[in-house]
Amino acid sequence: MKIKVCLISVSFVLGICSNANADVPHIIRFTPPPYATNILKSVNLRVAFDMDMNPLTFTENSFVVYGSQTGWHPGSITYDDSTRTATFDPDFNFKEGEWVIATLTSDIEDIDGNHIKSYVWNFSIGVAGGTGVFGPDTEYNTCEGPRSVTCADFDNDGNLDLAVGHRFSDSMVVFRNPGNGIFERDSVYALLSVGDWSDCRLRSGDWDRDGDIDIVFQRDTAKLSVFPNTGNGVFGTELQYPFTETSLAHIYINDFNGDGYLDIAGSDYAKFYIFFNDGSGNFYNWTDYYLEPRIIPISGGDFDSDGDIDLVTVTMWGTDEVRVRIFINQGDGSFVEGESYLIGYDTGSQSIYCHDFDMDGDVDMVVDRARGQGETGYVLIFMNNGDGTFAEYVEYTAEDEVNYLYGNDFNGDGYIDLVESSLEIDKLVVFLNNGDGIFLSPVYYNVGHWPDGSDGGDFDSDGDIDLVVANQYTGGEGTISVLMNEDSIQPNIGTSTRLLSFGKVNVGDSVLLPLEVYNLGYDTLIADSLIIPDSIFAVDESGFILLPESTKTVTVTFSPVTNDSVEDTLTIFSDDPDSPEWIVKLRGNYKLVGIEEEERVENQEMEIECYPNPFIRTVSIKYLLEREEIFSIKIYDTAGREVRILLNKLQRSGFHTVNWDGRDKKRNRVPPGIYFCQMRAGCIVSTRKVIILR
């Protein structure tokens, strides 16, 4: 049988290639994918490429991983040349609900010395349970005017501690956690510079990549303040980095220039700043962007899925039009203004939070809106359209002005929930995500006077997310309130992705993709059945049992009968009480979004012939190369395992023939059945099904 095809895109391996950058290696698959949730805390990070890579260029400085609560994660890095996949195995686990920042720097090269474009992606670790119902708050006295709080394992004992920034007392207070979630006030750190009134935003991060969590702090001083952690949760002398204005209203942390070090974005009402980390935890180099009208909050995410972290801010009170404003990263940490979205008139916003709320792989955002204290507050959900633009917002009503937004999976169902602090009514307000970004009616929890900045983490080591909020109380000594998530010992299902995209696949061919299923809970998970309604997709498992904190890999196959785009769902039925029907979306014959957005189309035709097929002893694979190119032929079984590499070398243009004798790499005859012959020429990949008879 002779097949004449025009190859449009990758069929066996995910990815999009670009004519303009044909010699540049591209990243074609991530595990976990960007903005995934419910990821196992012992996860290995894997990245697949479309070219053969130089394994010596994968180092701790080129494949860099941070946890927001556990700091820089060293680990071992391996490279599998048969699948062109680099795997990072962290030396220690992440924490439940932790935010992870991973960077692949441009120091990574292929075997010809071509560098990749740096890529930054974020995801969050899953939780072991939680009901999303919180007990009464426990208040701890701190200094006057607490405005913000952050949680991290400052002393590296495996327990989350707290740091609190204060508005009036010119201080930072650290609370240590002995392991039971009951905090002990430890140390008070005085600030070198003082101010009468400021936002006092405080954030944590491992700036110098020494494994200890440092703290960044800002007051009315025209200086960025950093407290370096000298080890065991003891902070050294405050370091100050001058800039041009008086204070930063909000701070957001990520790697903006893809160099593997955490940078800082801050807003000061008239500008936003990017403070670049010089690699040693210093921030002398900064740039600013003047905005008119004025702004308050700032946050970010990879809105356009190009591997760079973009920014979002909101116009503040006192302007006629209040808009959400997007700033697109140009790939080097510089920004240009993109789209903006009107949210009202003569109103304002205090906070933004970004994550993937509807589990479609794109980062969404939530913004608050209110006219001021005592006025009705609103929470606005903006869903990403998949191209970096956002649909019209969906509005949820809160009882009072929203002062701060924070998100995590509070009830263990794999969806990101929200909590906001309502200053005037002294409450935390929890919105549980019911799936697909739809939020239930708010639930109110009493806390201390004038709640403001909040954070969350597993304070009592029971696997769920607890909450903490700073209560400003201006009449004397302030407090923080800690609310514990009610215990839930149960199985908790998760998967490596909620969306499997197969790309373009030819009729008559099949593509197999692995899906990792996790049990993040503390009890055994029983998956009774795995169901796909449409026969175009198939899964190789009908049911299984997973012990706590273990993983099962299943294989999903896409075998199209037409060239039409197809969507379906894989439903995993299990005894997880929060997610008894866990759904993974399946897509076939859709354009895949990767590093390069331009789809590569080959103008020349490529002739491939497999004969005889089916065969008994030997099949001949004949093909035509239009130009000299590295060409490879690999054989895979129906589980996606590599059986044999038939060819991988530079070949001249013209007709060629390669034979497969039905044997594996150990020269043993393989069992009869269906196998897949994958052929790769440069950036083009095609797969043919061959059948062995006995």
Image (cartoon, helix red, strand yellow):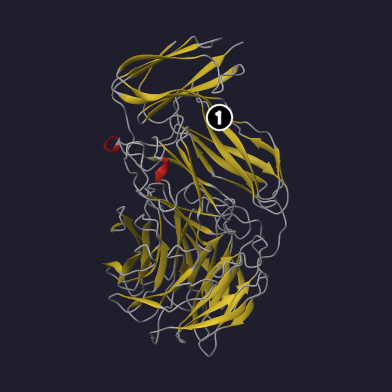
Q: Residues within 10 Å of mark 1 (few under 14, many from 20)?
A: few
Residue 86 drawn at (x, y percent): 47, 42
In-image side of 360 versus 462 (left or right): left
- Residue 130 image offset from top left, x and y in percent: 66, 60
Q: Is residue 505 above or below residue 72?
A: above
Which residue lies under the disc numbered 1? 641
Name the residue at 37% across, 36% down: 16
The total of numbered circles placed on residues is 1
Q: Which x, y percent locates residue 62?
A: 40, 51
User: Label 1 amino acid?
Assistant: Arg
174 shown above or below 547: below
Q: Residue at x 56, y 70 (%)?
A: 155
Residue 69 percent coordinates (x, y)? 53, 64
Q: What residue occupies the far bottom of the structure in this picture?
A: 476
Relative placement, left or right, of 294 versus 412 is left
Place residue 483 in its image quadrant: bottom right
Q: Quadrant of the N terminus?
A: top left
Q: Can you say whether 6 is above or below 79 in the image?
A: above
Comparing 424 with 66, the one in front is: 66
Residue 524 appears in the figure: yes
Decide which of 469, 187 is in the foreground and name it.
187
Q: Quadrant of the C terminus?
A: top right
* Label 1 element class: loop
Residue 460 position (above or below residue 236): above
Whether residue 382 appears in this view of the structure is: no
